[in-house]
Amino acid sequence: MRFKLFCLGFLVFSFSVCTSQTDPSKEKLVQGAVALTNSQVTYDPSYFSIAYPNGDVPSDKGVCTDVIIRAYRTVNIDLQQLVHEDMIENFSAYPNIWGLTRPDSNIDHRRVPNLMTFFSRHEANLPITNNPSDYQPGDVVAWNLGGSVTHIGIVSNKKTADKKRYLLVHNIGAGQVLEDCLFSYKIIGHYRYPN
């Protein structure tokens, strides 16, 4: 009887491990992020009036946060709407860096500190480490570039030439690109959403 229970437990554990490693929505998220690198995008931090929900800046423009927003839309997650709704209910929980007195659905989701706050508020935080294997495809990474300048990207399923870490999809000025930049800047956030 104990042997049967052990075997059943092992099978359940094995199944859960296998299914978590092949999460189709996570794979689609990563594929969506990588596909963004095929589009020509000019780095443009301008304020745009956009539709709500599911609004986007012009497809040939964007910043680092737009990479995250566009990737998540491939799995039907609209961070514009989610961040806006959370800010309506919890405005004081978000950074007061821009002097706003109320949420703005045109821009709030396009700001790195707001995305970091949203992910943290939804229990998506993961440890920040120096171990590249801790950063898995679909994870979101935020960096401090110096001073108050922040940046954000998403871990791809493509590895570096030495196979030691995954490349990231981000836009730091040269458009939506795939680069080996995980440890190029100081990591200040590591998220897996939804977890």
Image (spheres, rainbow, N blue to C red):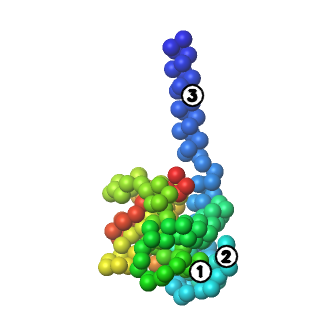
Residue 188 image label: none
Q: Picture coordinates of residue 64 (x, y %)?
A: 50, 75
Residue 106 image label: 1
Judged from the image, the secondary structure of the residue bearing numbered disc 1 is loop
Along the horizontal axis of the image, is 189 left or right of 90? left
Up-down: is 57 above or below 128?
Answer: below
The image quadrant of residue 105 is: bottom right
Dot 1 amino acid type: Asn
Which mark is in front, 3 or 2?
Answer: 2
Considering depth in this image, is 69 or 100 the residue closer to the camera? 100
Give me the residue at 57% from left, 23% from top.
8
The residue tagged 2 is: 52
Q: Real-space Cα distance between discs 1 and 2?
A: 8 Å
Toward the bottom, the furthest residue is 46
Q: Picture coordinates of residue 161 (x, y %)?
A: 44, 61
Give me the residue at 44% from left, 84% from top.
99
The residue tagged 3 is: 11
Q: Picture coordinates of residue 59 (x, y %)?
A: 64, 80
Q: Residues within 10 Å of mark 1 (few under 14, many from 20)?
A: some
Image marks 1 and 2: residues in contact by CB distance under 8 Å = yes
Q: Picture coordinates of residue 57 (x, y %)?
A: 62, 81
Mark with earlier residue (3, 2): 3
Up-down: is 34 above or below 63?
Answer: above
